[in-house]
Amino acid sequence: MPIKKVGHYTVEYMQILDEKGKLDKALEPEIPDDRLLDLYRHMATARDSDNRMLALQRQGRIGTFPLCTGQEAPACGAALAMRDDDWLVASYRERGARMMRGEPPTQDYLYHNGWEEGSALAEPKSMLRTAPIAIILGSQLLHAVGIAYAMKLRGEKDTAVVTFCGDGATSQGDVHEAMNFATVWNVPVVFVVQNNQWAISHPRDKQMKCKTIAQRAIAYEMPGLQIDGNDALACYKAISDALERARAGEGPSLIEAVTYRLLMHTTADDPKKYRSKEEEDSWWAKDPLIRFRDYLKKKKLLDDAKIKAIDAEIHAEVKQHVADFEAMGGFKMDAPFDHVFGTKHALIDRQRAMFLADLNRAQAADQVAETAHA
């Protein structure tokens, strides 16, 4: 019997605004001016917050955290494309999207300073906009598919889920299982893979052989698209189109946003150990924030004076958020033990007692030292 071809597949790449400022007008999305400015402001706020948090961490005023500098476009572009009742199921590098969905910046500072309160959303309604940060690689995609499946079971219309992961996370079994069941169940979920070229210190070409991550969608029978992840317009359009498809009952989509982590993986990392300055410089030249800012200048929505004023406002806001965070106190020190299980457990109770005893001893020792110093 002759061999028959059962399918023919291609992977498309979308770029609307390139790093040199060239615009593809045929693909340019129609976004109201006020929303374009809102997108720029949140991308700039995410960048300023990143810089401020890095300074705080180096001063010992906040704990280890992952940076999002260079990856603002996919997260903020997605948030702009979403509706109020959509769910955002984030990883740990979508700071801009979480702020756009209503998460108070002080909550992010609390979370990365080890306070359990940083995992608790202030308003129940916020649960329709965001979810706690997922640290276990790929686990959040399973949550996203579960939420989307619940939407389908409840007969909810015009709602969808957007979830994020990185290129390294796509090597996890959880990601395969999530994408597989998303298509089996035909649920309204958009998978956004931020391909920032590095799984911590492991380069992409040592993670996988495939030319694109988007082509993995072929195996699941879902649309797959690779986009310029430093192009805010492409990020918005691709995710907006995928959300419309999901809301229409046409199932999930996979979008690979090709981007770059311009700074360290986390503040515990030194990228100079594994990346060249030449590589980093080549990606700084593709900075998504500068590219989008210049686009808005060409549209006469920004000028140098407006940019300076916006930057000053953002810097003052971030400074105030930090002051608000550092003024907080009175938190329950053993709160993490409350959330291990849904019911009391003898082992957890013993560990709580040990923790509190150690804490009391440490506080007593500090008081003795302060008295002696006085």
Image: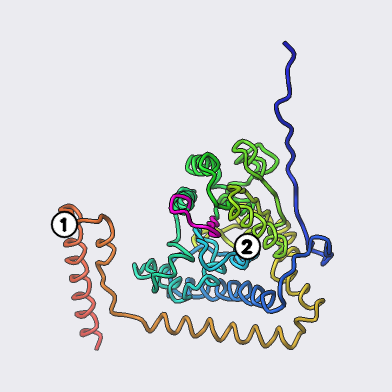
Residue type (three-letter) at the residue carrying disc 1: Arg
Kindly give the residue lying farthest to the top in the view shown: 1
Left or right of residue 162, residue 35 in this image: right
Task: Kindly indicate whether the residue at mark 1 contacts the one at mark 2 (C-beta within 8 angstroms).
Answer: no
Mark 1, Cα crowd under 10 Å, few <14 / some 14-19 / many 20+, is few
* Quadrant, the N terminus: top right
Spatial separation of the CA atoms under disc 2 and disc 1 = 43 Å
Which mark is drawn over residue 71?
Answer: 2
Q: Position of residue 185 (x, y in %)?
A: 51, 42
What residue is disc 1 on? 350
Question: Is 36 above or below relative to 247?
Answer: below
Element assignment for label 1: helix
Asked if residue 7 can be seen in this view, the reply is yes
Question: Is 39 above or below relative to 68?
Answer: below
Q: Position of residue 150 (x, y in %)?
A: 43, 52
Residue located at (58% from left, 72% from top): 46
Q: Position of residue 126 (x, y in %)?
A: 44, 69
Whether 269 is among the magenta residues is no
Q: Position of residue 140 (x, y in %)?
A: 47, 52
Magenta part of the chain: 152-163
Which mark is drawn over residue 263?
Answer: none
